[in-house]
């Protein structure tokens, strides 16, 4: 075992399939060039367990092994529990007997939280990667993703697995039947990400969608099937490099997401303003209810102009670049 392990993992955007992916429908996602960095240090200590430090959140929590075992039932710190639990599951996977150390985890992230960009998944994935680096275990992405999913269960209740899978693998992926399948990225989709700065809780939104589906099962299942067709059309038009149709499909997709009940007035405002400025279309990305949205443009020059004009609406906008680099060890 080393004294220290380091890893990072990227943020993601969902291009199509939010929420419907929870109900085993396909989704398309991509990793972007914002990353979460995690460092884990093994310390000699009289107390055993995990200490998580997140300076950007001004948060710190210490967990003994009994508390970590009980986190699925008894939460301790909503902002840090998924990190601690991801590390705990990774340590159990690596060691036949839990080590008698205090493991200090330090987190630094470029990804805005509660914005629909998969910040919790990226941190969970990077945490597991750092544990693997600490013990000099091979970077097995399938295993890392499965362990990080345990942390996502803590964070979101009933996640689909798309966030941790995408962050682990990297690049454009089709997430289908619980597995990520790489998509050819020879065509770069010109996307502007706008963070509405409206925070929301993914777990609550997922629960609200489930309640609506339970209340209107026949109607909502038809909607979910329609969303599957939209995702297939979007995938096909990415392959055909047809930006005009992609813009139309983004708007159709947004309508479906509104019907699920995960829209927000500020999202509608920004999409409407972007359309007036010449965007080809747009949609929310992630759980909705605020967070971030995607705006499709003809090219990056046009998106630069749109981003400048949208600043007056108190949003954070940036043109995204898709990265093929998923989880990796850091020096």
Image (cartoon, rainbow, N blue to C red):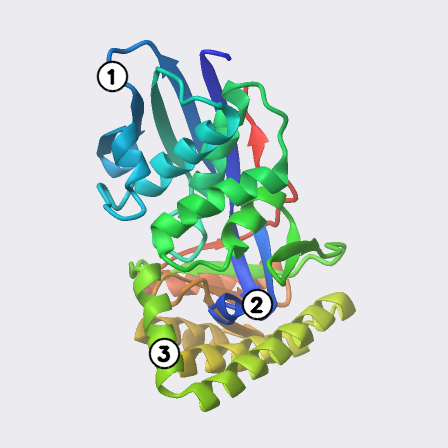
What's the distance in space between the residues labelled 2 and 1, CA to CA?
52 Å
In the picture, measured across the screen, residue 163 lies left or right of residue 45, that is right
Pointers 1 and 3 in contact (C-beta within 8 Å): no
At 54% from the left and 56% from the top, the residue drawn is 162
At 32% from the left and 37% from the top, the residue drawn is 69
Which dot, 3 or 2, sits closer to the camera?
A: 3
Q: Secondary structure at mark 3?
A: loop
State the residue lying farthest toward the bottom.
Answer: 219
Residue 324 x %, y %: 66, 44
Which residue is the site of mark 2? 296
- Determine the image quadrant of residue 104: top left
What's the distance in space between the residues labelled 3 and 2, CA to CA?
23 Å
Residue 310 x %, y %: 40, 64
At 72% from the left and 57% from the top, the residue drawn is 183
In the picture, measured across the screen, residue 143 lies left or right of residue 182, that is left
Which dot, 2 or 1, sits closer to the camera?
A: 1
User: Tag 2 or tag 3, which sits nearer the N-term?
Assistant: 3
Which residue is the site of mark 1? 47
Query: Which of the numbered marks, if any, corresponds to residue 58?
Result: none
At 48% from the left and 77% from the top, the residue drawn is 254
Which dot, 1 or 3, sits closer to the camera?
A: 1
Residue 219 makes an appearance in the image: yes
Residue 289 makes an appearance in the image: no
Which residue is the site of mark 3? 261
For the C terminus, the quadrant is top right
Q: Secondary structure at mark 2?
A: strand
Residue 138 x %, y %: 63, 26
Q: Of 233 and 193, which appears nearest the observer?
A: 233
Residue 190 x %, y %: 62, 60
- Determine the image quadrant of residue 270: bottom left
Q: Above or below — where is 89 with respect to 138?
A: below
User: Tag 1 or tag 2, which sits nearer the N-term?
Assistant: 1
């Amino acid at each position: 075992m080393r004294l220290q392990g380091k890893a990072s993992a990227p943020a993601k955007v969902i291009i199509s399939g939010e929420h419907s992916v929870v109900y085993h429908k396909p989704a398309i996602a991509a990793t972007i060039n914002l990353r979460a960095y995690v460092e884990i240090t093994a310390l000699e200590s009289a107390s055993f367990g995990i200490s998580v430090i997140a300076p950007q959140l001004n948060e710190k929590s210490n967990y003994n092994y009994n508390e970590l075992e009980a986190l699925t039932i008894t939460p301790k710190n909503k902002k840090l529990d998924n990190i601690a639990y991801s590390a705990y599951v990774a340590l159990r996977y690596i060691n036949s007997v839990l080590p008698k150390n205090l493991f200090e985890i330090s987190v630094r992230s470029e990804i805005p939280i509660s914005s629909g960009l998969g910040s919790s998944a990226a941190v969970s994935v990077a945490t597991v990667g750092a544990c693997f680096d600490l013990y000099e275990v091979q970077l097995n992405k399938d295993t890392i993703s499965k362990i990080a999913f345990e942390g996502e269960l803590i964070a979101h209740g009933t996640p689909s697995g798309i966030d941790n899978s995408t962050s682990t693998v990297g690049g454009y992926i089709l997430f289908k039947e619980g597995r990520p399948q790489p998509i050819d990225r020879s065509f770069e989709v010109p996307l502007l990400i706008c963070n509405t700065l409206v925070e929301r809780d993914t777990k609550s939104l997922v629960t609200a969608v489930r309640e609506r589906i339970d209340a209107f099962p026949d109607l909502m299942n038809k909607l979910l099937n329609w969303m599957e067709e939209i995702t297939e059309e979007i995938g096909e038009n990415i392959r055909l490099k047809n930006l005009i149709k992609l813009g139309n499909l983004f708007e159709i997709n947004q309508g479906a997401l509104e019907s699920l009940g995960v829209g927000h007035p500020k999202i509608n405002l920004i999409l409407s303003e972007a359309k007036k400025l010449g965007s080809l279309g747009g949609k929310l990305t992630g759980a909705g209810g605020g967070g971030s949205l995607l705006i499709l443009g003809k090219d990056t020059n046009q998106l630069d102009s749109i981003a400048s004009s949208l600043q007056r609406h108190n949003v954070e906008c940036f043109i995204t670049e898709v990265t093929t680099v998923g989880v990796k060890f850091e020096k």
